[in-house]
Image (spheres, helix red, strand yellow):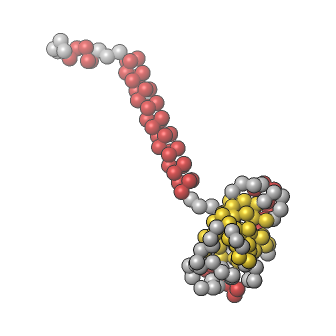
Amino acid sequence: MTAAAAPAAAVDPQRRRQRRLRLAGAFVLLAAAIAYLLVEGLGSSLDYFDTVGQAVAQRSSIGSSTIRLEGVVVRGSITRTATGADFEVAGQGRTVVVHNTGSPPQLFQTDIPVVVVGHFAGRTNVFVSDQIMVKHSATYIAAHPTRVKGPGGTVVR
């Protein structure tokens, strides 16, 4: 053996074990960081919403938190206001009055599925909204038959 090879072969087993533990700890920490970033990234990129029936049933636990509320605009309920529009959305046998500020989208009309973003006003079933998203796909109701239905189970175009 050469003099240079002797010290490498004589590495203390305890030092080797400590080095492996540090390396394993670094990998565990790295894996945990990656898992956290994936969970946070996927969780924040998903858009969750409650149907009218779910939101009314969970009204007390929702409080004044901002949510996305899905329902069908009730025929004859749209009233244009100086600041936006007031209307009703229905779903699963329940109805909620929506006070919307801002300009409704161009496709906004009665008998179509919408998602409104906002919160319940106080302890009432009045929903204060600042955004309306129109569900205008012809296949939306067919893809989600238990959520909302337009007249006859179809989307009005």
Residue at 64 percent across and 67 percent down: it is 102
Residue at 56 percent across and 59 percent down: it is 46
Image quarter where the N terminus lies is: top left
Q: Is residue 58 above or below residue 11?
A: below
Residue at the right extreme of this rendering: 123
Tell me which corner region of the image, top left, top right, bottom left or bottom right, holds residue 51.
bottom right
Disc tally is 0
Q: Nearer the viewer, residue 120 or 34?
A: 120
Q: Nearer the viewer, residue 11 or 142?
A: 142
Tell me which corner region of the image, top left, top right, bottom left or bottom right, holds residue 20.
top left
Image quarter where the C terminus lies is: bottom right
Tell me residue 142's x, y (percent): 61, 80
Q: Is residue 25 above or below residue 151?
A: above
Q: Is residue 106 above or below residue 4?
A: below
Residue at 20 percent across and 17 percent down: it is 5
Q: Is residue 49 left or right of residue 26?
A: right
Q: Is residue 140 above or below residue 46?
A: below
Q: Is residue 64 left or right of residue 15?
A: right
